[in-house]
Amino acid sequence: GAVVSQHPSRVICKSGTSVKIECRSLDFQATTMFWYRQFPKQSLMLMATSNEGSKATYEQGVEKDKFLINHASLTLSTLTVTSAHPEDSSFYICSARDSSTPEQYFGPGTRLTVT
Amino acid sequence: QKEVEQDPGPLSVPEGAIVSLNCTYSNSAFQYFMWYRQYSRKGPELLMYTYSSGNKEDGRFTAQVDKSSKYISLFIRDSQPSDSATYLCAMSGGGRRALTFGSGTRLQVQP
């Protein structure tokens, strides 16, 4: 299957700072990338969908000014958590797909802890 | 009511057993069906992808889709302790690019 990487795998930051998470498709062109959030023992919650070169589409209840998404190339999308607070601590996972198939391939996830 | 319903488990089976995991859904527009396996603190791994109704087999895994009943299944033969994980069904279609996930079933295979 296709490979998606995510960096960093784990990050600890102080309240009020911003954190950037990178998601890369390593062996295919990701026309669409998705960002999810997952709390312990819960399923994935879709935060936003982004297409290369376009503005992201955010799900209801997700603050676009707090979770900045950039999908500047066919292999890279970034999620920036701005002015992070302890309640933003979570497991963030990206996925990617190309335009020809509906399968989504997930990155390994980033565990964010805000102190 | 959720669009996709999945029993959260946990489901505990002895090693070597046949495991049956299931999801039901309500949106008749769904036509792409996937099963993911997620180990603790890891991203989901795509196991099986099926388009529309029918069966698909890959090694010890068999995926079944019955669109008339809006019911999908994943069977695992000769289950191993390494199969212990959370299994998520996911589906899309009807112009929606994002996947709609079930809540996941936690499987424990006892050695």
Image (tube, coloured by chain):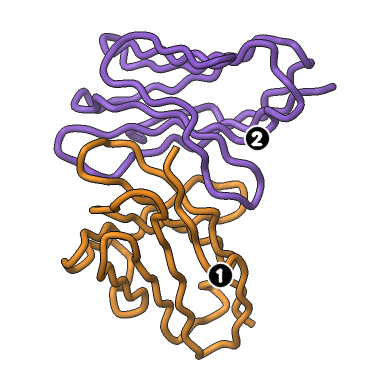
Residue B18 versus residue B1 in the image, above or below: above
Residue A56 versus residue A27 in the image, above or below: below
Place of residue B21 in the rendered image (x, y in percent of width and height, measured from the top left): 54, 19
Residue shown at the point (23%, 65%) measured from the top left: A56
Q: Which shade is chain A?
A: orange
- Say which element carries label 2: strand
Residue A99 versus residue A34 in the image, above or below: above
Q: Which image quadrant: the N terminus of chain B?
A: top left
The quarter of the picture where residue A63 lies is bottom left
**Which mark lies nearer to you, 1 or 2?**
1
Please give the residue where the numbered disc 1 appears in the rendered image. A8
Q: Amino acid at mark 1?
A: Pro
Please give the residue where the numbered disc 2 appears in the rendered image. B85
Place of residue A100 in the rendered image (x, y in percent of width and height, measured from the top left): 21, 38
Q: Which shade is chain B?
A: purple
Q: Read off the chain for label 1.
A: A
Kindly indicate whether the residues beneath marks 1 and 2 are on one polypeptide chain.
no
Near-viewer residue (A57 or B63):
B63
Left or right: A28, with B104 as reference point: left
- Say which element carries label 1: loop
Distance of label 1 from label 2 (alpha carbons): 23 Å
